Image: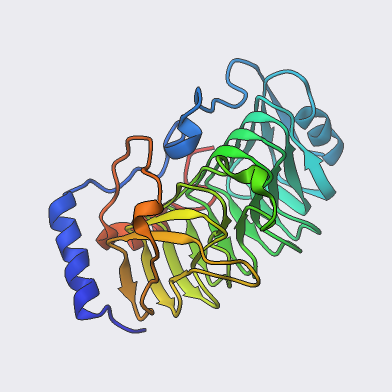
């Protein structure tokens, strides 16, 4: 394992002195970032609570027209993508609960919370957010071994926070914006990625089109195969106080046939990693919410201790 360059270490130390911030809590009771805006995200709060242990019970609860808190008990085998209706909280009970063989899709819906689930071996995506869905909070989950993406957000979806998740054993992790020609995404795709652990994954952490601003804050990237964050196709991404360890390309400005996007960098910690690329930082829109960033020097310890299932008392 390599050591941070002198410059990177100096920047990390400087940010610690300037920030003087307390380590972030690993169990927020409500989302930070974009999912806290636009009226906030409360999920099934105010509705009934049900516990499900079978695929059929899960499918019925997810599509209910009522606000519901759905407690998933145990690992439930499903096939395909299960639709989630608006005003739902889907919570895993304990560290061993979740979905095997399929995933969850949110299409044209709002006000949904997904927490404390392991979603694995999906034949499609683990999580798919599309068609203008908004106010979605995806928090403290484990995602691994899907056929396609682990958390894909696209088609004018908006006001989403992806926090405290662990992504591992996978290639294409997190896509934001699906097509270079989909100009309907302009003005949408505002997403906060905070305190996630990208653990030995390959690419898309996230890969962004059009979204501006997209806030990539206090995440830990370890042993990444291809690249960390990619900004393409007019996107504006603020990459702030993350920890990159064994990442040859922490940031990228063009992937596949997509043209370059824009990236603003601030105080990212580099351990045995390449130099992050930036472009037109002044074109990255200002972050519109208040937040308290964590010092980059403590991100690794905080994220490895707090990300994933079993860390929030459910």
What residue is shown at x 25% (from left), y 62% (from top)?
297
Viewer-proximal residue among 263 and 4: 263
Residue closest to the far bottom: 2
Give the quadrant of residue 157.
top right
Could you tell me residue 167's position as x and y percent?
Answer: 57, 61
What residue is shown at x 14% (from left), y 53% (from top)?
18
Residue closest to the far left: 17
What residue is shown at x 74% (from left), y 29% (from top)?
85
Residue closest to the far top: 46
Give the quadrant of residue 174.
bottom right
Give the quadrant of residue 49.
top right
Viewer-proximal residue among 155 and 118: 155
Q: Is 43 placed left or right of 223 in the picture?
A: right
Residue 208 is at least partly visible in this image: yes
Is residue 209 shown above or below 291?
A: below
Could you tell me residue 26's position as x and y percent?
Answer: 40, 45
Viewer-proximal residue among 231 and 2: 231
Residue 217 is at least partly visible in this image: no
- Quadrant position of the N terminus in the picture: bottom left
Could you tell me residue 224's position as x and y percent?
Answer: 51, 74
Q: Is 66 placed left or right of 281 in the picture?
A: right
Could you tell me residue 48's position as x and y percent?
Answer: 67, 17
Is residue 39 shown above or below 99?
A: above
């Amino acid at each position: 394992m390599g050591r941070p360059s002198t410059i990177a270490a100096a920047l990390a130390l400087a940010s610690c002195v300037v920030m003087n911030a307390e380590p972030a809590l690993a169990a927020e009771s409500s989302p930070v970032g974009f999912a806290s805006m636009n009226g906030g995200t409360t999920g099934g709060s105010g509705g009934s609570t049900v516990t499900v242990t079978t695929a059929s019970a899960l499918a019925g609860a997810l599509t209910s027209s009522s606000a519901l808190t759905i407690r998933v008990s145990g690992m439930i085998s499903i096939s395909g993508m299960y639709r989630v209706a608006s005003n739902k909280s889907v919570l895993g009970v304990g560290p061993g609960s979740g979905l095997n063989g399929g995933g969850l899709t949110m299409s044209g819906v709002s006000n949904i919370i997904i927490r404390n689930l392991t979603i694995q071996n999906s034949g499609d995506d683990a999580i798919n957010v599309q068609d203008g869905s908004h106010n979605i909070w995806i928090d403290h989950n484990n995602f691994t071994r899907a056929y396609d993406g682990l958390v894909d957000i696209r088609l004018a979806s908006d006001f989403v926070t992806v926090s405290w998740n662990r992504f591992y054993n996978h290639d294409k992790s997190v896509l934001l914006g699906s097509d270079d020609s989909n100009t309907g995404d302009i003005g949408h795709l505002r997403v906060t990625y905070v305190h996630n652990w990208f653990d030995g994954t390959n690419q898309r952490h996230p890969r962004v089109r059009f979204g501006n601003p997209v806030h990539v804050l206090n995440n830990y990237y370890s042993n990444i195969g291809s690249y960390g964050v990619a900004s393409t196709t007019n996107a504006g991404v603020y990459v702030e106080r993350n920890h990159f360890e064994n990442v040859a390309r922490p940031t990228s400005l063009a992937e596949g046939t997509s043209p370059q996007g824009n990236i603003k960098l601030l105080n990212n910690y580099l351990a045995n990693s390449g130099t992050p690329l930036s472009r037109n930082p002044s074109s990255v829109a200002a972050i519109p919410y208040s937040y308290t960033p964590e010092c980059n020097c403590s991100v690794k310890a905080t994220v490895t201790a707090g990300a994933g299932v079993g860390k929030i008392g459910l």
